[in-house]
Image: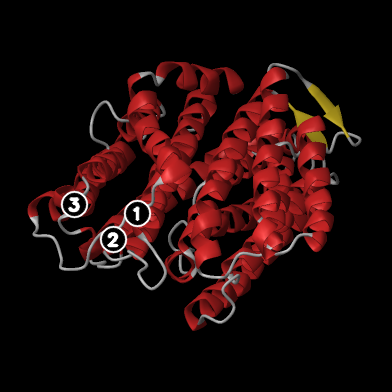
Amino acid sequence: MAPELVVVFGAFALLMLDLFLDERRRVVTHALAIATLLVSAALVWFQVGGQGVALSGMFVRDEGADLMKLALLLVSALSLAYIWPFLRERGLYKGEVAVLVLFAVAGMMLLVSAGSMTMVYVGLELLALCSYALVAVDRDSPTASEAAMKYFVLGSLASGLLLYGMTLVYGATGTLDLGEIRAAAQDIGGADRTLLLTGTVFVLVGIAFKFGAVPFHMWLPDTYHGAPTPISLFIGSAPKIAAFGMCWRMLDIALGPAYGQTQLMLAVLAALSLGVGNLFAIAQANLKRMLAYSTISHVGFLFIGLAAGGPDGYAAALFYAISYAVMSAAAFGAIVMLARKGFEADRIEDFRGLNARNPWMALLVLLIMASLAGVPVLLGFWAKVAVLRAALEGGLLWLAIVGIVFAVIGAFYYLRVIKVMYFDQPTSEPVTVRGGALQVVFSINALALLGLGLFWSPMMEWCLRAFA
């Protein structure tokens, strides 16, 4: 548990340190928060391949958990790099922001290593409560306050449904340990079987809420739109990896014997998310809302892998979750790069004529949008191929066809951003792109979509090993 302890103790230490720092030296808190995440990631990297349990089996360490932790730690560190300049110039940055991010990351790490339903709920609530506070960081903004309230109310509803489902599963099996639940579920029958399946449905509903899958997506567009852009970046990237970890632990490791009943529900959620996400995204003029609805569509693709099931299906879904986290960070990062105080750069028309003003920035945004659209050789293409292939191998031909159709439809709104950048006339408003270290970070983030697309095989092999 060394990586988790580093993050938790680092968060407490920074909470105390921030009390003694004035406004001018608050960058120290932020830099140390990033360093804490990188140190934790290094510990995970050097311990990869180990196995073990702690806390009487409530905490499990395996290769799947290591891969997810490494990905979410690096993406969270990337998110912190975007957060600092954006919030500082608006007078919104407080030391608590970095501390809340660290506690949220600790919750995600516990979630992907959960060996008990108790740990699943502890990790989930630690992540959720920190996320609610982060969304409301701009407390004087009516939009941000409304977004935080909607997120809190609907997130609490989802947590309640998930907890109720866990209660029913416990009532049917008599245990909270995920491995023991699986063993008990294999031999269960009669009324207890009905109770178990009812609990599984509620668990799946809670998971769908956390992902933002249709029809449990109503919180997502308003939250992404209302929150400060780098906060939207954070909650839209790393938590998707943690949500996959929760889904895998609950639906496969614990409730695997009920897979025959959950497969159809997962497939329907995937199809609905693909349809609603892509069709509503086409109508958006605000880039953050467009990315929010596109997130719903990408959740649909991720659910295709979950519906396919088996080692290949879960490996494809994990590969998609990691790929989307990197792409989402880059997409919201593009808005951060162009935004400044008084100009949020969150409308599609704000990118008009960008190529004429800054060709390098336009090229990076082109890579991001093309990867999200699934253009070949970029990372997003291989992620889509992986889940569609898993669906075909899992006997879900109809769902693979739905995925292909909506992948083509979804390309439209990403290509529209590219068209605006390269073929529309620049606006009279000058475009100012952030320079310095953040430009380097953003360039690496965007170019990683090309690099990982060209060399995607090692990451996919690691995902396959995690579920072998």
Q: For residue 194, say whether it is visible.
A: no
Q: Is residue 57 above or below residue 160?
A: above
Q: Name the disc covering residue 357, or none.
A: 3
Q: Nearer the viewer, residue 409 or 215?
A: 409
The residue where tag 2 is placed is: 281
Give the residue at the far front of this rendering: 24
Query: Mark 1 to mark 2: distance in Å?
Result: 6 Å
Front: mark 3 or 1: 3
Give the image's coloring scheme.
secondary structure
* Count of marks, rendered view: 3
Q: Quadrant of residue 370?
A: top left
| Image location of residue 105, percent across then percent down | 68, 46
User: On the picture, is 202 further left or further right than 308?
Assistant: right
10 Å neighbourhood of mark 3: few (<14), some, or many (≥20)?
A: some
SS class, disc 3: helix
Tell me which residue sits at (59%, 78%) in the image.
Answer: 139
Question: The C terminus is located in which quarter?
Answer: top right
| Image location of residue 467, percent across then percent down | 59, 23
SS class, disc 1: helix
- Mark 3 or mark 2: whose residue is earlier in sequence: 2
Whether the residues at callouts 1 and 2 have beta carbons within 8 Å, the answer is yes
10 Å neighbourhood of mark 2: few (<14), some, or many (≥20)?
A: many
Residue type pointed to by label 1: Ser
Front: mark 3 or 2: 3
Tell me which residue sits at (49%, 66%) in the image.
Answer: 228
